[in-house]
Image: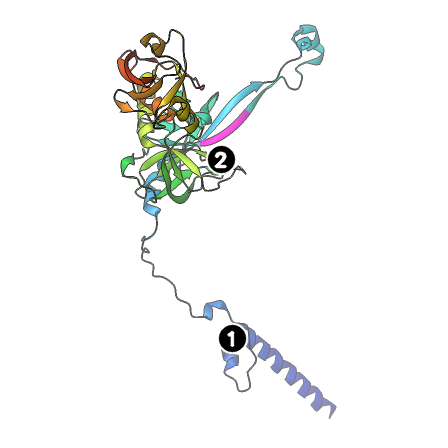
Amino acid sequence: MRRLWLLFAQTVTIGLAFWFIVATLKPQWASGFVGATRDVPVNISSVPVQESAAAPSSSQGSYREASRRAMPAVVNIYTTKEARQPKNPFMEDPFFRKFFGERPGEQEEKQFSLGSGVIVSPQGYILTNNHVVEAADEIEIALADGRKAVAKLVGTDPETDLAVIKVDLKDLPAITLAQIDQAKVGDVVLAIGNPFGVGQTVTMGIVSALGRNHLGINTFENFIQTDAAINPGNSGGALVDTNGNLLGINTAIYSRSGGSLGIGFAIPVTTVKTVMESIINTGQVVRGWIGVEPQDITPELADSFGLKKNSGTIIAGVLKDGPADRAGMRPGDILLKVEDKPVSDTTEMLNLIAQLKPGNKAKMTVLRKNEEAALDVTVGTRPKIRRDTVE
């Protein structure tokens, strides 16, 4: 009897072991037995799923083609500035140097910053922001294809915050400039750059507004506003349309935290092209200047001057012996027209005068004691890097 019981126990044990192996490795076998109602884990590969065909998927609603065209022309920019810490005057003495050597703080320190740029010519010209490269001792660019090169500064224009640098590399992918007059509010745009140094990134948004000014960012303002995410490191990068053509150079954001709040600004390609050509041809941007201090007309000033409308610019000050002074312009005059083009405010006045060629005479209409007078002003050259209110 004892032997029979041991034989039974061994048979049951072997059967359970066999069942466990089958249930684990071949659960479909176990499900076929009568009484096998217990759920068993199944391999995901046995679950029927639907997968797309191997053929390329539709690009409808995608901006992959615009990104593919524009991204190779956008570069990362790394700048280096060497700064020497103040030395202790005693360390200039050879006797002290003999015993103490170089002290900490005397060695030159390198400060790194980064931004973005856009290749606009196969000849190696790259557009970026002035604030990205200003005061840099060394500029290095990195292309999307992995190539790196040291760039030289061609010229800058602080008043539009633009700069041109150049590299000597072959087979550079230059971007195509868009027709900005065809851009409308609501158009989809892509911002390409290197935000926070994470690497080349594409963000999407729309054109929120055109012709933004009076922001106090630059002297000459005519920004494209967009809600495409622009963050530190995007400066100097490209704002492109859905065809991958350059609409503007990303330059600034409105932010309380340092990150994107959906209000970014780009310098339009019209301004970019004019500044770029001037820098490449002459090394600088030459603008007209008459030597006055303008002031916008407020409703209160309009009442005090007895004006019927708020257009025009009040001449609050005139530079002694400047172009306007020599032409007879006086403080208190209201500038109405420049070369028969109406002046609506200070910003428009700055832009109209900047477009005048230095050395030429320009007709300007002023309102003085409720009477209009025409003045012939010999246009001067706008002083370099003057960020005050004197025009």
Report helix, strand or loop for mark 2: loop
Point 53% across, 87% down: residue: 34
| Mark carried by residue 26 | 1
Mark 2 residue crowding within 10 angstroms, few (<14) / some (14–19) / many (20+): some
Q: Nearer the viewer, residue 15 or 324?
A: 324
Residue 162 visible here? no
Q: Badge 2 is on which residue?
A: 232
Quarter of the rendering occupied by the C terminus: top left
The residue drawn where x is 34% and y is 47% is: 63
- Single out the residue that lies furthest toward the bottom: 1
Along the line of sight, which residue is nearer the eye, 325 or 286?
Answer: 325
Question: Which quadrant holds residue 187?
Answer: top left
Residue drawn at 29 percent across, 21 percent down: 337
**Residue located farthest toward the right when viewing the structure as drawn:** 2
Stretch of the chain drawn in magenta: 111-115
Quarter where residue 12 is shown: bottom right
Relative to 323, 114 lies left or right? right
